[in-house]
Image (cartoon, rainbow, N blue to C red):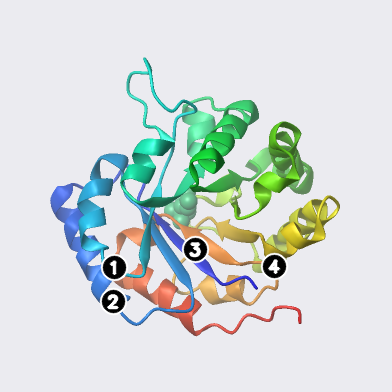
Amino acid sequence: MRSLLVIGNWKLNGNKNTITNLTIALVNAFYNISKCSVAIAPPVMYLDVVKRYLLNSHIQLCAQNVDIHLSGAFTGDISAEMLQDLNTRYALIGHSERRIHHKENDADIAKKFFILKKVGLIPILCIGENKKEYDSGYTQSVCINQIKAIIKLLGIEAFKNSVIAYEPIWAIGSGVSASPENVQLVHKSIRDYIASYDASIADNITIQYGGSVTPENVIQFFDQKDIDGVLVGAASLNANSFSMIVQTAEKHKKPYPD
Ligand code: PGA
């Protein structure tokens, strides 16, 4: 059975002081959380700072990126083993900001997926279409192709204990989220596609939505059958907003199939 997963992606924001304060506020706010899963993804250089405050907390650590190598002459990169060393549980891969600004392609992302699984971290594979693709009706084929690239290299088994985050690029940071009904259709098509390989993996995989999620709109996403959580950017930088989103997840009774 899938439980809701809420992740806060802090992107390139904050400093030691603000990140410490935000972490402490969230640890205090989430002392009673037990049903949904929560993770925060601070900038990588603060993972160790944040980790110290999470010792007895329900909040898990998430990295925003990972390198394809485990060690060696790769200046500026961070390995999956280093993330594991800091008790990091999840890592985002294929976020559109990395696909766009760092020219990451599906092959690079598949290698990242592989290395995370090898080390025992949970990959959060971000997928989604741009505005032009959305307007042309290509949303589902873009998403399926991004998933196919992983299956081609690693096989369907790789999706066991993995997460997919569907994030339409045009909805990220725009203040305009996708409609929950459309997101449900996309999530269902993703789950059906995975089920065409393996029904049990499809049933168990967590598929999050991301893109301008707020405390006000989040419940409409949770109300959809195939939306298993949210990946939150801007609203996760504010302790009150992120707490409201997590409390909504905690209280939600998902209409899962029997
Ligand atoms: P947003 O970002 O919530 O600010 O739209 C989401 C994301 O990029 O993961």
Q: Are marks 1 and 2 in contact (CB under 8 Å)?
A: yes
Q: Are marks 2 and 3 in contact (CB under 8 Å)?
A: no
Q: Is residue 7 above or below residue 128?
A: below
Q: Dot 3, crowdedness within 10 Å: few (<14), some or many (≥20)?
A: many
Q: Which residue is mark 2?
A: 29
Which sits earlier in the primary sequence, circle 1 or circle 2?
A: 2
Q: Which corner quadrant holds the N terminus? A: bottom right
User: Mark 4 falls on what kind of element?
Assistant: loop
Q: Which residue is mark 4?
A: 226
Between circles 2 and 3, the one closer to the viewer is 2
The amino acid type found where label 1 is placed reads Ala
Instruction: Judge: label 3 CB < 8 Å from ligand 1.
Output: yes
Q: Image check: 210 left or right of 73?
A: right
Q: Are marks 3 and 4 in contact (CB under 8 Å)?
A: no
Which sits earlier in the primary sequence, circle 2 or circle 3?
A: 2
**Corner quadrant of residue 105:** top right
Instruction: Judge: label 4 CB < 8 Å from ligand 1.
Output: no
Q: Position of residue 96 (x, y in %)?
A: 54, 39
Between circles 1 and 2, the one closer to the viewer is 2
User: Mark 1 falls on what kind of element?
Assistant: helix
Q: What residue sits 48% from the left and 47% below the top? A: 121
Q: What residue sits 52% from the left and 63% below the top? A: 230
Q: Which residue is mark 1?
A: 239
Marks 1 and 4, how far apart in space? 27 Å
Marks 1 and 2, how far apart in space? 8 Å
Number of numbered discs = 4
User: Mark 3 falls on what kind of element?
Assistant: loop
Q: Image check: 239 left or right of 245?
A: left
The amino acid type found where label 3 is placed reads Val
Which sits earlier in the primary sequence, circle 4 or circle 2?
A: 2
Marks 2 and 3, how far apart in space? 19 Å
